[in-house]
Amino acid sequence: MSTRVRVRFAPSPTGYLHVGGLRTALYNYLFAKRNDGVFVLRIEDTDQSRKVEGAVDNLIRTLDWAGIHFNEGPGRDANHGPYVQSQRLTIYRDHAHELIRKGHAYYCFCTPERLDELRKQQAAEGKGQAYDRHCRALDPAESEKRAASGERHVVRMRIPEYGELTMRDVIRGEVTFKYDVLDDQVLIKSDGFPTYHLAVVVDDHLMEISHVIRGEEWLPSAPKHVLLYRYFGWELPVFAHLPLLLNPDKSKLSKRQGDVAVEDYRAKGYLKEAIINFVAFLGWNPGDDREIFSMEQLINEFDLERVGKAGAVFNVDKLNWLNQQHIMLKPVEELTALVRPDLEANGIMGIDESRLRAAVALMRERIPFVIGFAESARYLFVAPDTYEEAGVKKNWDAETGPRMLALAERLSAMSAFETAEIEGAVKALAEELQIKASKLIHPTRLAISGRTGGPGLYELMAFLGKPEVVSRIRNAVEKINLLVLGA
C-alpha cells in the first residue's frame, strides 16, 4: 500500500447525492487536502437494478458545485482505473477464484426457491435470517465441475464458525465482532457481478486506499472486509466509520421526513459555502465555539480525531442561520450576480448593475436565500400595489393621510436627498406637528414598501430617490384612505 494518504468516495449512481453522501465526500476530501493526499471518486454500480441514467454526471456536477474536486476518477485516470465497478468485472472474478483456490470461498448452488423456504422456516422458528451453509461442505472438485458446466451459482465467503474478530476504528476505538453472527456473504452474484463486499475490498487495495472513511451503516460489514484483507494477505487500511445522520426526533435521516438530496437545497437557493459549513459540523467540531468556516479553514482544521461517535442531528434551522451568515460575508459584487437570475425569472428585468449592487448592499442582512430575493425585495424596483393589512390597521387612521401629504410636500422641497437630511426632515415635521416621530416613520415605511419591516427607513428612502418616494407616499394616501376611510 502507498505510504501517501489516498482516500475515496464511492457512491452508487442512484439518482441524487444524499446529504450523508456529501458529508462522506467532504470528510474524505478535507482529510486528503489536509494531508497532501489523493481524493479518488469511484462509482459502485454493481447493483445494476438501482442504476439511474445520468446519475454519474449529476453526481460529478454536484460535487464540483460544492467545491469538492476529485484527483482521480471517471475521466481523470491515474493508473488505478477503471473507476467504475461495472468495468472491472474480470478483476473481481479473478480474485473470487483466488479465494476459492485458497479455501476461503466456495460455490453455492442453492436455488432462490430453496433460500426463500429457508428464510420462511427461520422466521417461523424465530431465528435470524442467515444462509445455512448447505453448500459449504460440497466437494471442491465437484463444485468446480458444476460451476464450469454452467449450473447457476453464486460464490460465498467462508466465515469462521467460532471465535471473534477485533478491529480498530479511528472514531470508535477497538470494535469486536463474534463470527457466529456473521453470514457466509455472497461475493459474486449469479449474474457474474460482485457484491459490494468483495468489490470494495479489491478496489480499495488495488487503488492503494490508505484510509476508509465511510458511514456508520457500513460498520456491521467491516469484519467481513477485514477477513477478506486477511484472506488475500493484504495490509489493512485505516478505518473510520462516521456517525449516523439523524432527524430532530433522533430517527435516521430519510426522505420521508424532508429533503435529503443536496440538489434540493441547491434549488432552494442555499449557498454552497453554507451547505459545506453545515455538513462539516454533522459529526465534527473544531474543539471551540467557532461556527463559521470557509472550505480553506475546514481544510486547515479538519482532523478525524475530532469526529464523534454520537449521531448528528440535521437541524434545518441551523442550516438557515449559516446560510444567512455566509450571505452577509459575501462580497456585494458576487451576491449581485447570484440574485440577478432570480429577479429576471420574476419579471424584474434590466436593472442597472450599480443600482442592483446598491439594492443588495441595502438588503444583505435580510436575504435568507438568493432564490426568493425578488419576492422579498420587489418593492426596491416596483412600487407596491398592496399594503400589509395588519400594518394598515395598526399605523393608519383618519389623521395619517394629511400628515403623509405634508411629509410628501416637505420631501419635495429638499435639495439634498441623503440619509441624514431625510431623517432630519422627518423629525422636524414630527416636532412641528407635535407628534412622535414614529407616527410618521411607520406609515412612511408602509407607504413606500407596502410592508412593516425592512432595511433602515432613511437608507431605503435615499435608495429609492426623492421623486419615487414622494410619488409612492401620495399613491398610498389615496389607496389606503379608500381602504380605511372609504374616501
Image: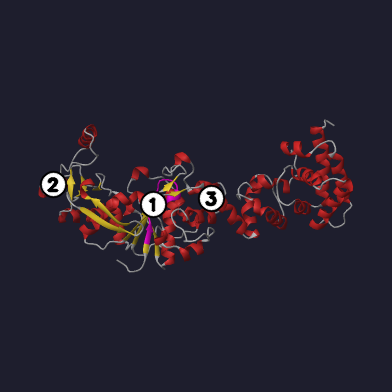
Give, as a single range, the part of the protein colored magenta.
7-20
Does dot 1 land on a helix, a strand or a loop? loop
| Residue holding disc 1 | 11
- Spatial CA distance of label 3 from label 1 is 24 Å
Q: Look at the numbered disc 2 and give the secondary structure of its residue.
A: helix
Spatial CA span between label 2 and label 1: 34 Å
- Disc 3 crowd rating (10 Å Cα; few below 14, some 14-19, many 20+) is some
Residue at screen point 53% across, 58% down: 291
Whether label 3 touches label 2, CB < 8 Å:
no
What's under tag 2, amino acid-wise? Ser
Residue 301, given in percent of the width and then of the height, sits at 47, 64
Who comes first in sequence, dot 3 or dot 2?
Answer: 2
Mark 1 Cα within 10 Å, few/some/many (few <14, many 20+)?
many
In the rendered structure, find residue 319 and report the number of the disc placed on it.
3
- Comes first in the chain, label 3 or label 1: 1
Q: Nearer the viewer, mark 3 or mark 1?
A: 3
For mark 3, give the secondary structure: helix
- Which residue sits at x=47%, y=48%? 314
Residue type, label 1: Pro
Foreground residue among 416 and 283: 283
Q: Residues within 10 Å of mark 2 (few under 14, many from 20)?
A: many
Q: Residue furthest top?
A: 486
Q: CA distance from mark 3 to mark 2?
A: 56 Å
Q: Residue at x 47, y 44 (%)?
A: 248
| Residue highlighted by disc 2 | 143
Q: Is residue 9 magenta?
A: yes
Q: Amino acid at mark 3?
A: Leu
Residue 12 rendering spot, x and y as whole percentages = 38, 49
Q: Earlier in the sequence, mark 2 or mark 1?
A: 1
The overriding secondary structure of the stretch rendered in magenta is loop
- Residue displayed at 51% across by 64% down: 297
